[in-house]
C-alpha cells in the first residue's frame, strides 16, 4: 500500500474531475429537459448535505472549534454557492456543457484580477517576470472565454463527421440561438465571478477555522435555506417541485453526491499537495466533458470553441506558473495564503 500511496492524490484528482464533468452534463440535461433551475439547485444541495454528514462524522468528529461566525458563513454561502449555482444552472439553458467546463479554467484568472482590484494581492517588483506571466495568463483566459462565447467557427470535421452529415441538428443546436448563447456565456462568466469572490472570502475563514468539511456542510445548509426561499418566490407551482423517476431525480442525486465527493477530494488534495497541484487538473474536466457531450449529447464541436479552450488552458497554466514562482520564494505561510485564491 505504501508503494502506491504517492499515486493516491493523482487518482483522487482524476476521479474528482471526471465526476465534476458528469455533474455539468447532468445539470445541462435536467434543465434542458424542462426542470426548473431553482428547484434543481435546491434538491442538489439537499443531496450534497446528506452525503457530507457521514463524511464529516468520520473525518472531523473529534475536531474542536471556537464558535463559528454563522452570519458570515450565511453571506459567503449566498454569494459563492447560492448565486453561483443559480447563475451556472440558468446559463446551461443557453450554452453547452463543454463551454461550462472550459470557462471554469478562467476562475484562477478572475480570482487574481479581483484580488488585484481589491488590493488583496499586489504585483511584486522583485518578481517582474512572474507578475507579467500572471497578467498574460489573465488576459489569455478572458480572451479565450469571450472567443468561446462569441465565435464558434466551422465544425471540427473529423470528430463530428457523422453529426454534420445529418440534415437535422442536435437538440442543443436547435434550441440555442446566437443571442441566447452570448447571454448564457455572460451568465456563466458572472457565475465564475461569484465563485471567485467566494474563494477570496473563504480563504481567511478556512485558515481561522480549519475544518473544511464542516464549513462546507454549514454552507450547504445555508444554501438550502436560501435556495428554498428564493425558489418559493419564483416557482409556486407544486408540480414543479415534484421529483419523479426521471432524469431530474437522477441529475439531482448525482450532482449533489458528486459535488460533495469532489469538494471532499479537492479539500484533501489541497491539504496534502497544495492548491496549485489541485488547480493543475482543471483542464481534465473540460476534456471529459467534451467526450461526454459528443458521445451522449450529440454536441458538435467547433474550431472557435477549440481555440477559446486552448487559450483558457494556456492562460490557466500561465497564472499557475506565476503563482508557483512567487510562492516558491515566499515563506510557507505566505505560500499557503497565496494558494488559497487559486481556482477550484
Image (spheres, rainbow, N blue to C red):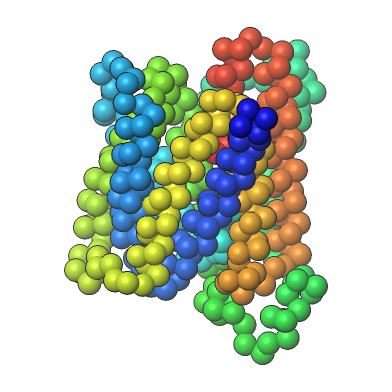
**Image position of 81 with respect to 200: above or below:** below
Above or below, comparing residue 217 to residue 149 in the picture: above
Which residue is the extreme one toward the front? 1
As drawn, the residue found furthest toward the bottom would be 167
* Residue 247, picture quadrant: bottom left
Please give left or right for residue 89 compared with residue 329 in the image. left
| Residue 309 placement, left or right of 9 | right
Image quadrant in which you'd find residue 216: top left
Instruction: Count up the numbered dots.
Output: 0
Is 210 placed left or right of 133 in the picture?
A: left
295 and 145: which one is in front?
295
The residue lying at 60 percent from left, 66 percent from top is 293
Tell me where residue 301 appears, x and y as whole percent: 70, 68
- Residue 54 percent coordinates (x, y): 33, 39
Work out whether residue 26 or residue 307 is closer to the camera in this orientation and state it: 26
**Residue drawn at (42%, 67%), measured in percent from left and top?**
30
Residue plotted at (56% across, 61% down): 97
Decide if residue 267 is in sight here. yes
Check the picture and name the quadrant holding the C terminus. Answer: top right
The quadrant of the image that shows the N terminus is: top right
Specify the quadrant of the image occupied by residue 81.
top left
The image position of residue 119, as x and y in percent, is 55, 22
Name of the residue lying farthest toward the top: 331
Residue 105 seen in the figure: no
Residue drawn at (37%, 67%) of the image: 248
Image coordinates for residue 302, horizontal then vertical, percent: 72, 67
Amino acid at each position: 500500500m505504501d508503494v502506491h500511496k504517492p499515486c493516491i492524490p493523482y487518482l483522487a484528482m482524476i476521479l474528482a474531475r471526471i465526476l465534476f464533468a458528469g455533474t455539468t452534463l447532468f445539470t445541462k440535461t435536467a434543465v434542458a429537459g424542462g426542470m426548473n433551475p431553482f428547484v434543481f439547485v435546491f434538491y442538489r444541495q439537499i443531496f450534497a448535505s446528506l452525503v457530507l454528514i457521514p463524511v464529516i462524522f468520520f473525518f472531523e468528529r473529534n475536531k474542536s472549534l471556537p464558535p463559528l461566525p454563522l452570519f458570515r458563513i450565511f453571506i459567503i454561502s449566498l454569494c459563492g454557492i447560492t448565486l453561483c449555482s443559480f447563475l451556472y444552472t440558468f446559463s446551461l439553458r443557453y450554452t453547452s456543457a463543454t463551454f461550462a467546463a472550459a470557462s471554469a479554467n478562467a476562475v484562477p484568472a478572475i480570482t487574481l484580477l479581483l484580488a488585484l482590484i481589491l488590493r488583496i494581492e499586489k504585483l511584486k517588483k522583485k518578481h517582474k517576470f512572474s507578475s507579467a506571466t500572471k497578467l498574460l495568463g489573465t488576459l489569455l483566459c478572458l480572451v479565450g472565454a469571450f472567443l468561446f462565447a462569441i465565435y464558434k467557427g466551422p465544425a471540427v470535421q473529423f470528430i463530428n463527421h457523422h453529426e454534420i452529415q445529418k440534415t437535422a441538428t442536435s437538440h442543443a443546436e436547435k434550441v440555442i440561438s446566437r443571442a441566447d448563447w452570448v447571454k448564457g456565456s455572460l451568465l456563466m462568466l458572472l457565475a465564475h465571478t461569484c465563485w471567485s469572490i467566494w474563494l477570496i472570502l473563504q480563504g481567511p475563514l478556512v485558515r481561522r477555522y480549519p475544518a473544511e468539511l464542516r464549513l462546507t456542510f454549514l454552507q450547504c445548509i445555508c444554501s438550502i435555506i436560501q435556495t428554498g426561499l428564493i425558489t418559493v418566490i419564483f416557482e409556486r407551482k407544486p408540480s414543479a417541485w415534484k421529483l419523479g423517476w426521471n432524469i431530474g431525480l437522477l441529475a439531482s442525486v448525482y450532482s449533489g453526491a458528486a459535488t460533495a465527493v469532489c469538494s471532499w477530494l479537492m479539500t484533501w488534495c489541497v491539504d496534502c499537495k497544495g492548491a496549485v497541484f489541485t488547480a493543475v487538473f482543471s483542464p481534465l474536466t473540460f476534456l471529459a466533458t467534451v467526450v461526454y457531450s459528443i458521445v451522449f449529447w450529440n454536441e458538435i464541436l467547433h474550431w472557435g470553441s477549440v481555440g477559446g479552450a486552448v487559450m483558457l488552458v494556456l492562460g490557466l497554466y500561465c497564472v499557475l506558473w506565476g503563482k508557483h514562482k512567487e510562492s516558491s520564494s515566499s515563506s510557507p505561510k505566505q505560500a499557503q495564503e497565496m494558494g488559497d485564491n487559486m481556482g477550484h
